[in-house]
Amino acid sequence: MKRIRKPKLAVWKFASCDGCQLSLLDCEDELLAVAGKIEIANFPEASSKIVKGPYDLSLVEGSITTPHDEIRIHEVRRASKFLVTIGACATAGGIQALRNFKDVKEFISIVYAHPEYISTLNKSTPIADHVKVDFELRGCPINKDQLLEVIRAYLHGSKPNTPAYSVCMECKRCGTVCVMVAHGTPCLGPITHDGCGAICPSYNRGCYGCFGPKETPNTDSLAARFSELGATNQDIVQVLRNFNAWAEPFRRESEAHEKKVRKNKDNSR
Amino acid sequence: MPEHSILQRAHFEQLLGALKTRGYRVIGPTVRDGAIVYDDLNSTDDLPVGWTDEQEGGTYRLKRRGDAALFGYVVGPHSWKRFLHPPAVRLWQANRTGKNIQIEEEKHAAPKMAFLGVRACELHAISIQDKVFLGGSFVDPLYKARREGAFLVAVNCGQAGNTCFCASMNAGPKADFGFDLALTEIIEGSEHYFLAEAGTPLGEEILQELEHRPAENIEVEKAGSIHEKTAQQMGRTVDTTGIKDLLYANMEHPRWDDVASRCLACSNCTMVCPTCFCTTVEDVTDLKGDHAERWQKWDSCFTADFSYIHGGSVRSSTKSRYRQWMTHKLASWIDQFGSSGCVGCGRCITWCPVAIDLTEEVRVIRATDIRTKSMAKETDDGNTGTNPR
């Protein structure tokens, strides 16, 4: 019988906390099944043995924040047949994209004794801003079951079940009481991409938007409702400036409210 | 006139006992996370004793009552569809061994469930879902098994909520059909009892097992006046006159753009609606590709995938999705199933995070009906020649 070559998997890290790639190791029971179907060829976090490329499936974690990484991502793309970004950093720029709203040079001059050693970009950007991405998996961190689903879908040539609708869908299926309606807690669920299983509302917390904007997110209407519930413009800016702050719909909304904060300050002067 | 009995509050526990003895899983209202939800009840103590709810568009709050009523509130975020038409169900599994594929049909357990505290609007909602799942040529076997095993204890509402409008939809507040037992809770000073009415032989049989006595006329009248008072309390109203033609004629009404600017397309209204029945199927495979499962899950017409066909989503805008939902619920449902799809429970108003109110949307569309508007415009145009401006 002809021996079928297993597809080669590589895991790449850019600016990130490693949490998403650890989700793969966190698969534990399923990890053996993964290893049975796919050759873990380049995953430094798991093994120092590195098999040369090209790779069939690349999982890319982290955002682009340095001139060096700006070049390296193109090398990764060239070595990868199918490239999947994993997590909020790789798909939206991550928490480090908070720098995008400020002057990063000013931070460097304050934080580092020798700012001249620091070589960094003004903005933290998602992978898709630099190279073609074949699939984006959301979350901060990603959901390991969804990661397995993406690998499974890749292996079988199907579309992964990672719906782009709101967190509310999952919340309601679980039977969780809406924290916004019943408690008045601001919750990003109605504009956030499903995938976490609606964890926070089930613990009586509002959604933090870890999975980024859902399809057709109406951020403007939700922000208006937050104001009615007593949130200030500054509160709204903060709620939207999280792991997915640089994702377009969240960024646009937070900038609109930031403008209002500035305007109010100017008026009160 | 059907016979009525009086069941004392002190003996209410006997009802739960009688149901459990017959092997029923008793499900009813209970307080959880700041709301009254439907869940398993062990005893009367699990009921929201002395609680009530205050509801408005996008707002729900529990409040203490001045008495120890068992059913002194209206409907919460859950509906009975959670039990009759569960949110996620495995339909079948398949296993591959070598070149053989074996399909394993799901053996759905048919639980005996007793629903305690079913409101009139909910009885109407269940009868609407009966039509959907059992009425046509394709019967849903899962729903059928659950529905046939269900024992319904209705409770006539002693008060209406701010988002209630069952009276407008002819769906309450008094339960007039579809129950095994119906209760009206009456509290007067130190008196606390239920006027009970059996709707089926099984309901009658269970009622006979409880300590009770025949009701006096005055007690029946008291219950009647409670139902009347509740009907007068409705926080919302809808004028349903010609509503089908109204909505069909107003597909291009500018109000749909207005509501789309507020709508989050989050699907909450459809999830809480007791008549919304749509599902999707999701195929799940293991990594090896040797085991597959097909799951049925609640779906919503507010997602892009819902109307996805070759080439993209038919209803890509939120405007088209809201219009589809409301027009289906209030108009095309009549063509499809012979009745309105709305029972006036008000859940879609209360549980909309941004307080969109379909009764208000209907009101605005009626007040600015494009048919009358275009007629007015024609008159205007006709007048321009003789009426120089």
Image (cartoon, helix red, strand yellow):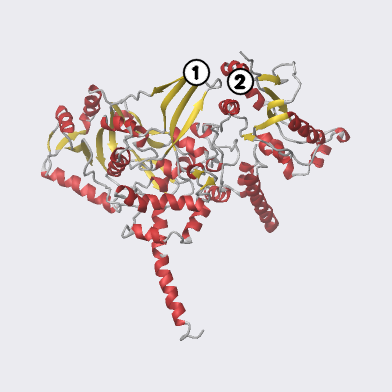
State whether residue B168 is above or below residue A180: below
Chain at numbered mark 1: B
Quickly name the residue at label 2.
A26
Name the quarter where the N terminus of chain B is drawn.
Answer: top left
Q: Is residue B92 visible?
A: yes
* Residue lying at 48% horizontally and 55% vertically, measured from the top left: B259
Please tell me whether mark 1 sits on a helix, a strand or a loop: loop
Residue kind at label 1, given as amino acid type? Lys
Foreground residue, B62 or A96?
A: A96
Q: Position of residue A20 (x, y in %)?
A: 65, 27
Position of B1 with respect to A109 (left or right) is: left
Residue drawn 28% across and 26% down?
Answer: B112
Does A194 sit left or right of B76 as displayed? right
Residue drawn 27% across the image and 53% down it: B232
Q: Quadrant of residue A146?
A: top right
What secondary structure is found at the residue carrying circle 2?
A: loop
In which chain is the residue bearing label 2? A
Residue B300, image x, y percentages: 45, 42
Nearest the camera: B235 or B316? B316
Q: Residue at x 48, y 52 (%)?
A: B320
Disc 1 designates what residue? B99
Please state which amino acid type lies under the numbered disc 2.
Answer: Asp
